[in-house]
């Protein structure tokens, strides 16, 4: 794409010059002229009274945009178990494929029992499946080569993967091989109804804004998505699909995985799989406030989460942090205590089924996304809530 000035229509009125935020328009021989500083912001298109400025599509743009069809999801597995984020991506992919009127495919590397059949039951129309021992354990080089070759052969329009340690490691390699764009750590995916481009939404500038990113001229459109921000599709035990075997002959590697060592912390904090989370922020007031939250969590059988502010204060370890720089969670119930609701925290818990906010400030942004809100002091409300729950349980 580029912006063009029709010199025959241009009268040299200079209105377009003042409209350009990049100083990319100058007068040359009393006519407007677009310079290489143009960033295609399109601010000038509607200001010319003569209609002398237009956007022109290049042949290469149309050619690239017209190539490819289908939505693909890379189904991550570890130790023969399909990752939860893969099922979430199938849910998002099913929705996107429906909007585009196309099909949904999953790609699975490594032998996973009934894995391909399960992916179909979770929404995939077909599964490209490589069960070779050489790809049983994740390794950047063979994974990137194998998936890039599949994409080149079948030319999907959209490719999605989890923003996990695995996805963040090798998906950028594939984007570089294919000379296409990649948006990392997305929290929302939509289809533009006019252009049919993928709208990839992610936090930017430290989480202070939500940026919508497009890849309008190259295919496939690639994105990694944060775990626990999408909902899985509905499971259908009778759903049928196609399983396509994939050879690992081209997945050569100069390295091999010798051993995988798991890190074990003193306290297991599995927030990602928790059904109930009690989380505290700076409004809790300190370690004594968190002691009240631990009592509530014990009564509920819940896990403890925290905002970055509480972690930065040293009131609770980092492994409990929820948000953009912590864990992304999606429990059935999320109780936010003394958390203001900054966007950095919200992007990590907004997919929770029920959000209960407790804050003494009635204007706190957290109430904008809360299912239920309680205005009051943490030190008064939490003990009352804990006592009522224990009485209801007969504890």
Image (cartoon, rainbow, N blue to C red):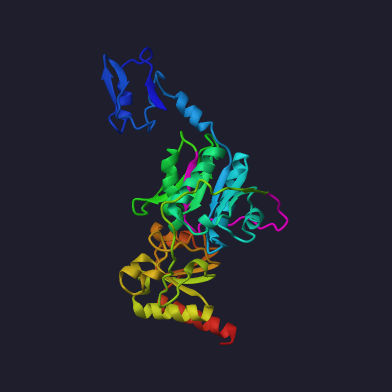
Q: Quadrant of residue 32?
A: top left
Residue 382 x %, y %: 45, 78
Q: Is residue 183 left or right of residue 96?
A: left
Q: Is residue 158 above or below residue 15?
A: below
Magenta portion: prevailing SS class: loop
Q: Is residue 146 left or right of residue 310?
A: right
Pick whichever, 234 or 25, lies toward us: 234
Pick whichever, 260 or 164, lies toward us: 260
Q: Which residues are magenta?
A: 220-241
Pick whichever, 243 or 371, lies toward us: 243
Residue 73 x %, y %: 55, 49
Task: Identify the residue shown where x is 51% and y is 42%.
Answer: 149
Pick whichever, 320 or 23, lies toward us: 320
Q: Quadrant of the C terminus?
A: bottom right
Task: Identify the residue shown where x is 43% and y is 41%.
Answer: 177
Furthest toward the top, the residue is 8
Q: Is residue 161 above or below residue 7?
A: below
Residue 259 x %, y %: 44, 65
Furthest toward the bottom, the residue is 395
Residue 159 magenta: no
Q: Quadrant of the N terminus?
A: top left
Q: Is residue 386 above or below residue 98?
A: below
Task: Identify the residue shown where x is 56% and y is 54%.
Answer: 132
Residue 221 magenta: yes
Task: Work out whether residue 231 can be spotted.
Answer: no
Task: Work out whether residue 201 can be spotted.
Answer: yes
Q: Quadrant of residue 154?
A: top right
Q: Quadrant of residue 10?
A: top left
Number of callouts in the render?
Answer: 0
Furthest toward the right, the residue is 238
Q: Is residue 227 left or right of residue 11?
A: right
Residue 62 x %, y %: 49, 27
């Amino acid at each position: 794409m580029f912006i063009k000035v029709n010199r025959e229509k241009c009268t040299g009125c200079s209105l377009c010059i003042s409209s350009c935020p990049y100083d990319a328009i100058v007068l040359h021989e009393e006519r407007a002229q677009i310079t290489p500083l143009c960033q295609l912001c399109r601010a000038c298109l509607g200001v010319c009274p003569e209609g002398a400025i237009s956007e022109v599509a290049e042949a290469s743009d149309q050619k690239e945009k017209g190539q490819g069809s289908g939505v693909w999801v890379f189904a991550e597995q570890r130790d023969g178990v399909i990752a939860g984020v893969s099922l979430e991506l199938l849910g998002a992919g099913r929705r996107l494929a429906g909007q585009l009127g196309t099909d949904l495919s999953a790609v699975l590397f490594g032998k996973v029992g009934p894995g391909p059949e399960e992916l179909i039951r979770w929404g995939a129309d077909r599964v490209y499946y490589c069960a070779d021992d050489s790809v049983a354990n994740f390794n950047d080089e063979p994974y990137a080569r194998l998936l890039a070759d599949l994409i080149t052969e079948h030319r999907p329009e959209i490719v999605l993967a989890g923003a996990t340690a695995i996805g963040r490691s090798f998906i950028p390699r594939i984007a570089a091989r294919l000379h296409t764009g990649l948006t990392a750590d997305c929290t929302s995916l939509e289809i533009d109804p006019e252009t049919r481009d993928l709208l990839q939404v992610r936090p930017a500038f430290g989480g202070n804004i939500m940026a919508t990113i497009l890849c309008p001229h190259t295919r496939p459109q690639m994105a990694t998505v944060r775990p626990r921000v999408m909902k899985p599709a509905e499971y259908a035990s009778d759903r049928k699909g196609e399983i396509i075997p994939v050879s690992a002959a081209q997945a050569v590697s100069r390295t091999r995985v010798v051993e995988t060592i798991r890190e074990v912390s003193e306290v297991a904090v599995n927030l990602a799989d928790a059904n109930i989370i009690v989380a505290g922020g700076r409004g809790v007031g300190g370690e004594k406030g968190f002691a009240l939250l631990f009592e509530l969590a014990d009564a509920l059988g819940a896990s403890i989460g925290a905002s970055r502010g509480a972690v930065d204060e040293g009131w609770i370890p980092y492994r409990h942090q929820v948000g953009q720089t912590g864990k992304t969670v999606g429990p059935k119930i999320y109780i936010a205590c003394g958390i203001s609701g900054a966007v950095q925290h919200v992007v990590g818990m907004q997919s929770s089924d029920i959000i209960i906010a407790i804050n003494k400030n009635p204007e706190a942004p957290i109430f904008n996304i809360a299912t239920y809100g309680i205005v009051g002091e943490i030190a008064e409300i939490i003990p009352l809530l804990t006592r009522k729950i224990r009485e209801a349980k007969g504890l």
